[in-house]
Amino acid sequence: MKRGRLIRSLRSLVWKPSVTEEVDSELDFHIEMRTRELMTRGMDRERAQAEAVARFGDLGRVHSTLERIGRRRDRRERRSEWLSELRHDALYALRQLRRSPAFALVTILTLGVGIGATTSIFSAVYAVVLRALPYHDPGSIVRVYPHLDGNDESARASAFFALRDEARTVEHLAALEYTTFTLVETDQLPSQHGGARATATYFTLLGVKPLLGRTFLAEEETPGRDQVAVLSHRLWTERFNADHAVLGRTVAINSRPVTIIGVMPASFTLSAGAEEMWTPLALTPEERADYQKGFLALMGRLRPGTSVAQATTELTAIDRRQAEREPRANPRRTVRLDPLYATIVGSFRERLFILLGAVGLVLLIACGNVANLLLARGASRSREIALRAAIGAGRGRLVRQLLTESVMIGLAGSVAGLVLAIWGIKSIIAMSPEDVPRLAQAQLDPPTVAFALVLSFLSALLFGIVPALRLAGTDLQASLSEGGRGAIDGSTRDRLRRSLVVAEVALTLVLLVGAGLLIRSGIRLQGVEPGFDPARLFTGMLTLPSARYPTADAVVRTYRDIHDGVRAIPGVDSAALVFPPPMTDINASAGITPEGRPLDASGQMSAGLHLATPGVFATMRIPIRAGRDFTDDDVTGRPRVAIVNEAAARSGWPGENALGKRFALLRDSADAPIWWEVVGIVGDVRERGLREPPQAEMYLALAQTPPIILGALQRSMFVVAKTRGEPMAQLRQIKEAVAKVDPSLPLFGALSMEDRLANSMASARFNSVLLTVLGVIGLMLATVGIFGVISYFVSQRQREIGVRMALGATPRTVLLLVVRQGVRPVVLGVLLGLAASAAVTRILGTLLYDVSATDPVTLIAVAAGVLGIAIAAAAIPARRAARIDPLAALRE
C-alpha cells in the first residue's frame, strides 16, 4: 500500500490524478488513520485494520458515492473554467472588433446580406413546404381522383356514394362541389365569395374544430334541411367584423335564407383563400344516382396500416363495379390517390427549394468574402498571435480564440440578417403569385429565428476555421524577428485567397446562368401568341343563383339583357359573354363523339367546353378560320350548332374538313345521342397559360345550352368587353348595366385580360426575379472579393513593383501585370462555373420554356459579363499600382 501511495504521489506531480485515484487515496488515508487509532488501544495491526474497514461500512458503496461526487465536482470545475475562458475570449473578440471598426462593419454587413437572404427564403419554404398542415394526422389524408387517359376528372355522385359505402381502406370519405356564393345582407351591397358545398364528413376528416359554433350534421345533407352555412375566419373578419353574435344570424345566400352556424379558425384553409364559406352538399335522389355529370372533388383518410397502392386498388375495383351498372361508362377509367400535402403545395415545393439552394450559394459567396478578409487581417495580427504563443498559449487555445471572434462576427451578422429578413419576407410575399399556398404565414417565427442563429454559427465555422488554423500555425521565430511579415508564408496565403476567389466566381456564375436561363425563358414565353388579343379587354364574372333562376330560359334571358346593356355603354366597342374565358383557373371539359365513331366510350374524345354569346370571337379577336360566329338565331328549337378550334378539328376529323360535321354530346330523355353541327372553326387559343399548348376546345351557343350543362357550370358567365380606353375604367358602368337587370347580382373577379395574362406568368416571373436578385448580390460580393485580393496584392508587393519600375518597367507593364494576376483566378472560376452550371441548371428544366439548360447564348453572355466586371474590378487597384513612385517604394 505504501508503494502504491508513493507511485500515486509521484504521478500527481506530473498530472492531476483521476477521480478514482483521489477516492482510493482518501479512503486509504481514513482507514489508515482509524487503524493507527485502534492500534494505540492495544490491537495488533491486522485486527485494527480489519476493525477499521468494518466500522467504515459498505466500502464499495462509499467508494461509488465518492466517485460520483468527485466527477460532479470535476464537471462543475471544467464547466466553470470553460465558461470563464469563453467569457474572456468573447470580451477579447469584441475589443478586437472595436479596434477595427471598418473591418467589423464590412464583415458583418457581408455576412448579414447572406444570412438575411437565406433566412427570407427559408421563411417562405417553412411556411409553404415544411410547416405541417393544421389538420389531424395530415399525412394520411388523400385526394381521390377518377383518372382517364392520363387526366384527372371530377367524380360522379353515384360513384362517390358507392366508394363511401363500400371502401374499407379509406375512412371519412368526403365530397365537395366548389362553387361561388352570392351573399346579401340588409343594407349592404351583395358580394360574391368562393366556397364549397360539402358533406359533413369534410370537417370530420380534417379534424379541426370550429372557432365558433358547430359544423354540419349528417341529416343536413338533405334538401330542405341544408339552409345552414359555416364561415371562414377571413370572411367572418372582413364581412362581419369578427362579431361573435354572427351565430344564428340569417342571411341570403344565392337568394335563399341561410343560418350561420359556425366559424372556422384562421388556420383552416386548403388553398390561398379560395374557400370562404361552406354549405351542406344536399343532393336529390336523382342527383345521387347520376352517373353522367361529374362535379365532385373527393377526399378521404387512409386507415392505419393502409398504403396508397392498396387503397388505389380497392377504390378502382369499387368504381369499376359501379361503372358496370352504367352502359355509357368508360372501362378505362381508374382511381388515382394523391396525398393532400402534394395537392396543396404542388410545384411550389420544387421552386422554393431551388431558390433555397440558390440563396445558399449567395451565403457561401459571402462566407468566402469574410474568409478572405480574415486572411488579410491575419497578416497584421501575426506578431500578436506569436507573442501569445510565446507566453504559453497552445495552438488549440489560439484556434478557439480566433473561432470565438468568428462566432461573434457570425452572431452580429445574424442580427443584421434578421433585420434584412424582415424586409426580405415582406418583399417575397408582395412579389409572389397569389396562388402560393400559406405564403402569407411567412414571418420571423421561432423556427426561422433558430434557423438564422444556427446558420450564423455554421457560417462562422465555415469562414473562420481555415484562417484560424493558418494564423495559429504562425512561425514563432520569424514573426518575432521580422515584425510579422513572416507569420504566414506569402505564397501559401495568396494561393488560398485566390482559391476563395475562384470558388466565389464559380458559384456566382452558376447563379447568373440560372437567372439568365429563366430570363431568356420568360422572353420566349412573352413572344408566344396567346391566340387572342388581350389589349383593352375587360373581364368580370357573374353567377346566377338557382333559387332565382331555376330554368334555362330565365338564365338565357337574363344574360341576354346583360349582354345588351354592356354593349350599349359608351366607350365599349364590342361585348360578349363566355364561360370560361382564357387565362383563368377554371377548366370545363366534356367527352364528345365525332359522327362516324362508335357511340360508346371507345369513340369519345375530350374537349374543353365553353359557353358563348354572339360576338365573342370578334370581341376577343379570335380569328374565325372557316364558317361563322354564333347569331341571335341560334336558340332553343333551332338546330344545335357548335364552333370548334383547329386542334379539335384535327383530332375529331383528321384529314377532313370539320365544317358541317356533327358530334354527339349528352343524351336525351329517350337515351338517344344529342347531335351538334360544327358551323365554325376558330384559331387555337392557349386557354390555360402561354406555357400550355392548345388543346381541343368547343364552344356552344349559350341560348342552346342544355340545363344539365348550365347547372354543372353553376349558371356562370364572364362579361368580356373591348373598350376604347383603360378596361378597368369601365367597371362602374358595367356594374350599373348588370344592376339594371338584377340589383342583387354582384360582378366579381373583374380584371383586364392583360392582367390575367400577366398573372398566368407570375410564377415564372417570381422565380426569375428572385434568382436574378440573388445572382446580382452574388456578383457584387464576388466583385468585392476580387477587388480585395488585387488591393492586397498591390499593398504587399509595393516594394517589388517599385523595384520593377526602377529597373525600367513601364506603368502599362505594371498595369497589365496586376490585372493579369487578378483575372487569372477569375478565368479559372468562370471555367469551373460553366462546368458546374451545365450540371446544376438541369434542375431548372421544368421551369424553362423553349430554352435548353445548357443554352450556349446564356452561358457565353454570362461568362463574358463576369469577366468584364472582374477586369473592371481589377483595374482600379492596378491603376494605383501603376502610379507608384519607385523611389518612395524603395525607401519604405
Image (cartoon, grey):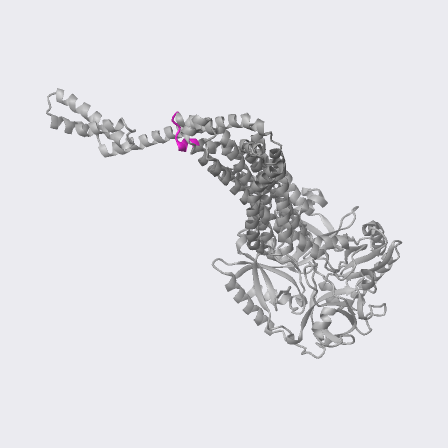
Q: In the image shown, does 729 or 400 lie closer to the viewer?
A: 400
Assign the N terminus to one quadrant of the image: top left
Q: Residue at image x 66%, y 46%?
A: 233
Q: Residue at image x 60%, y 31%?
A: 884
Residue closest to the far top: 40
Left or right position of 22 against 364: left
Residue 603 magenta-highlighted: no
Q: Which x, y percent locates residue 87?
A: 46, 27
Q: Which x, y percent locates residue 718?
A: 77, 58
Q: Examine the rendered structure and indicate whether residue 515 appears above or below residue 282.
A: above
Q: Looking at the rendering, which quadrant does residue 331 occupy?
A: bottom right
Q: In the image shown, does 294 or 492 lie closer to the viewer?
A: 492
Q: Residue at image x 37%, y 30%?
A: 78
Left or right position of 83 against 654: left
Query: How many numbered marks are there?
Result: 0
Residue 393 magenta-highlighted: yes
- Per the rendered image, the range of residues in magenta is 391-399
Assign the C terminus to one quadrant of the image: top right
Residue 478 visible: yes
